[in-house]
Image: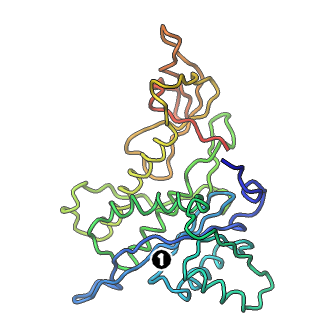
Amino acid sequence: MADLPSYRVRETKAFVHTGVDYAGPISITLCRRRGQRSQKAYICLFICLVTKAVHIELATDLSSDVFISAFKRFISRRGPVSYLYSDNGTNFVGAKAQLQTLVLSHRIEWHMIPPRAPHFGGAWESNIKNIKNHLFRTIGSQLLTYEELLTVLTQIETILNSRPLCVLTEEPFPEPLTPAHFIMASPLSYLPIERVSEDTRSIRQRKQLLDHMVRSYWKRWRLEYLNNLQVRQKWLVNNENVKPGTVVLVHQDDVPPLRWPLGVITETYPGSDGKVRVVLVKTCSGSYKRPVVKLCSLPSQ
């Protein structure tokens, strides 16, 4: 595997180097009125290739004009983009031609990956996978309005931008560095989500339905993210024991979005075979003994 491109490891403002891709389609209605027909909509994902921050827009079709409108909304909120990376979709090709005809004081340099080579765009393909796989399972056959789907996608954007990348400080308690710090220099916040029944047939109000979708998405995506941090080659490779001072995520069920439980291993308890299976973890709420299988070391950066 080759080294990362130089721009991926160069210090720069968020979204200066941006990748873009689409996911969908998703069936929506424009409003909740009798006789309204459904139509297709698409998720337009922008990802900072340096900080891993994401921005989600909702597009009503795959035309170049609609993409340019989504792109205008994106740069109006996130600031200028110097380098844009995408595949060779016809909407991107058309949008690139339109942007080149504009007289811009800060011209955008657009790079397209080779045709039929999606692995060249792994940075945005992996995030598209994170969004669409669980979102489609969460929404299911539910038909949302444009406004309702936009609300759900914006909260999903917050969840993705709250994932811990590494640790800022370890004393007295660990504080995670997230993509949100690069966007607004502080962690993101959210309105509390009302706890609703897992049985969607009992949900009466649309607001509760949206909260249920966000909670379901968080549960699915959190489990996948934590499982990726816990990959072990069972029976084939001897893994090193965890050591004191390691910063970990503590796997807990029913943790609300943006509340990643972070801790530092302060003591280990080796078994008779020398393997550490239980450790003492210091968190902001105290120190607790936890099995190693419930801990996930933060990914190295």
Q: Residue at x 26, y 87 (%)?
A: 33
Q: Residue at x 57, y 68 (%)?
A: 55
Q: Position of residue 124 (x, y in %)?
A: 57, 62
Closer-to-camera residue (114/212): 114
Q: Position of residue 185 (x, y in %)?
A: 68, 58
Farthest residue, direction top = 272
Residue 195 drawn above or below residue 84: above
Residue 252 showing in the rendered view: yes
Q: Position of residue 118 (x, y in %)?
A: 55, 63
Q: Horizontal placement of 254 versus 10: left or right?
A: left
Q: Residue at x 77, y 81 (%)?
A: 107
Classify 10 Å Cα crowding around label 1: few (below 14), some (14-19), many (20 and above): many
Residue 241, quarter of the rendered image? top right
Residue 144 drawn above or below residue 156: below
Give the labeled residue for mark 1: 58
Coloring applied to the structure: rainbow
- Provide the secondary structure element on which disc 1 rests: strand
Q: Horizontal placement of 301 versus 295: left or right?
A: right
Q: Horizontal placement of 127 versus 168: left or right?
A: left
